[in-house]
Amino acid sequence: MTKQQLIAQIREKNSFLCIGLDVDLDKIPKHLLAFDDPIFEFNKAIIDATQHLAVAYKPNTAFYEAYGIKGWQSLQKTIAYINTNYPEIFTIADAKRGDIGNTSTRYAKAFFEDLQFNSVTVAPYMGSDSVEPFLAFTNKFTILLVLTSNKGGLDFQGLRANDSYLYEHVLQTALSWKNSDNLMFVVGATKASYFKSIRKIVPNHFLLVPGVGAQGGNLQDVCKYGLTKDIGLLINSSRGIIYASNGTDFAIAAAKSALSLQQEMELILKQ
């Protein structure tokens, strides 16, 4: 998928909503446990109910790896289902990978060639040669962790040296890497006040923004400084949508929760 195709989908749906498919068997409706693959059945229902409202889906791979080979097979079936039935939707492997060059190449092949994701999240700590193998893939995107929404996010990301924060240095350095046009960046919604300075460094790249909803991030605050002429944001909500109900109406409830966010996004885009 190209950046322009993603932008076209955003404008068609009046939405920049990304739904996180972080499936916990302890939280899904109990009736699904009777299926041979309850994770896939849950995902399939959520996807079918929300595909007209979301422009991206983001499975966090830890929620699949935790269940061993069956969990990985559920992930394979989920991404294949999206690619077959809704190929216009952007897919994100939230894997947070990153290692020495030859290992990163293998990670990239796993997510881009085998599973056929459009993008993968990557940690920048090991530097350019750990990230550039991901960037080498045509029409695939590497989403670099920059400023995360978790409580300890600023422990290192907020360190200051030579009049800039570490996360700002990561942004500036990443722009010098080969094929940096294929970069997107993770910036947590709970750090909304930082978006103004971030946009001065990366005015045109897409930002993946977790933390809206259950983590307390505010959509209006994020959009105030984060939006660009090409939208430039993918706002992720996971628990607030997929666990809107734990009954047989879970997919309907998820759609209602997604619709509420989409309608808020549509109003913002019209302003």
Image: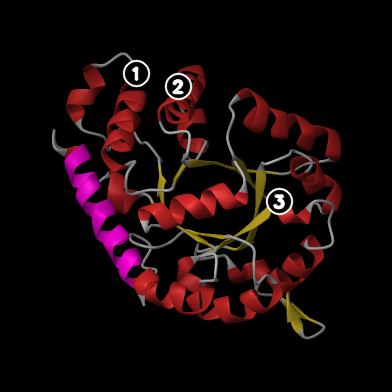
The foreground one among 269 and 197 is: 269
Q: Is residue 109 left or right of residue 60?
A: right
| Camera sees residue 208 | yes
Q: Is the residue marked by circle 1 packed among few (<14), some (14-19), or many (20+) residues within 10 Å?
A: some
- The secondary element bearing badge 2 is classed as helix
Q: Is residue 269 left or right of residue 228?
A: left
Residue 57 spot, x, y in % from top left: 44, 43
- The secondary element bearing badge 1 is classed as loop
Residue 49 spot, x, y in % from top left: 26, 38
| Residue that carries the numbered disc 3 in the rendered image | 182
Q: Quadrant of residue 217?
A: bottom left
**Contact check, label 2 and label 1, Cβ < 8 Å:** yes
How far apart are labels 2 and 1 at the CA level?
10 Å
In the picture, the quarter occupied by the C terminus is: bottom left
Residue 55 spot, x, y in % from top left: 43, 48
- Three-letter amino acid code at disc 2? Lys
| Residue that carries the numbered disc 2 in the rendered image | 77
On residue 37, the disc is 1
- Three-letter amino acid code at disc 3? Asn
Q: Is residue 187 left or right of residue 42?
A: right
